[in-house]
Amino acid sequence: MSKAREDIIPSIGLILLSAWVFYETSTYPPEASLLPRLMAYIILFLSATLIIKAISKVFSTGEAKQGEQSASSGQWVKIIPAVCLWVISIAVIPVVGFFLTLGLFWLILVLYLEGKGCQPGYLLKCAGYGLVITVLLYLIFRVGVQVPTPTGLFV
């Protein structure tokens, strides 16, 4: 199955997920449903875009080539440790705190998935990504919508 055809199935699933979010938030007050619906709109738009791109690619290139694979087995092997890191970070949130855990999670995940090691310049770049994501989420949740987040030893 070609990469274009493989993109269609998850896109349909994400469109169904968006519809479910719209259904579930239909009874919420407008201020409570704003963020989930915004996320559902974004997911819906990106999924529809991916379906359109995949369909146009299938029709423009014809049938998939025999033996074509979308990902090598080496890429799939990286998923298991990434999921384990995710589970560990969820377990650590009550102890360390949401924002510090989030920053460390992104730092370790990017370092692991890129596989470039701990080169000084690259490590600083990855730490910057983790810091930017953490600050943005802090501004969105704590300052913007004033939602309490899990705290631990560190805020």
Image (cartoon, helix red, strand yellow):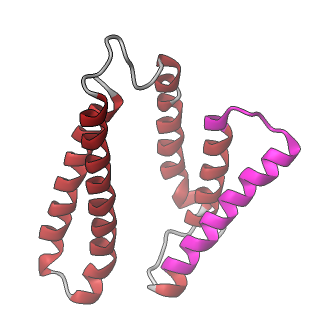
Considering every residue shown, the one lying at the far top of the view is 67
The spot of residue 115 in percent (x, y) is: 68, 32
Question: Is 48 covered by the magenta stretch?
Answer: no
Is residue 35 shown above or below 133?
A: below
Question: Which one is in front, 89 or 33?
Answer: 33
Question: Which one is in front, 100 or 133?
Answer: 133
Give left or right: position of 118 versus 155.
Answer: right
Q: Which residues are magenta?
A: 112-141
The spot of residue 75 in percent (x, y) is: 51, 25
The spot of residue 131 in percent (x, y) is: 69, 64
**In the figure, residue 119 lies in which quadrant?**
top right
For image coordinates 20% across by 65% down, the residue present is 21
**Can you say which quadrant of the picture contains the N terminus?**
top left
For image coordinates 26% across by 47% down, the residue present is 51
Give left or right: position of 59 versus 108.
Answer: left
For image coordinates 53% across by 31% down, the residue present is 81
**Can you say which quadrant of the picture contains the C terminus?**
bottom right
Give left or right: position of 150 versus 25.
Answer: right
Question: Which one is in front, 125 or 100?
Answer: 125
Considering every residue shown, the one lying at the far right of the view is 120
For image coordinates 47% across by 37% down, the residue present is 83
Q: Count the marks: how many?
A: 0
- Quick check: can you spot residue 153? no
**In the figure, residue 26 lies in which quadrant?**
bottom left
Question: Is 120 covered by the magenta stretch?
Answer: yes
Main secondary-structure element of the magenta-colored stretch? helix
- Quick check: can you spot residue 92? yes
The spot of residue 112 in percent (x, y) is: 64, 36
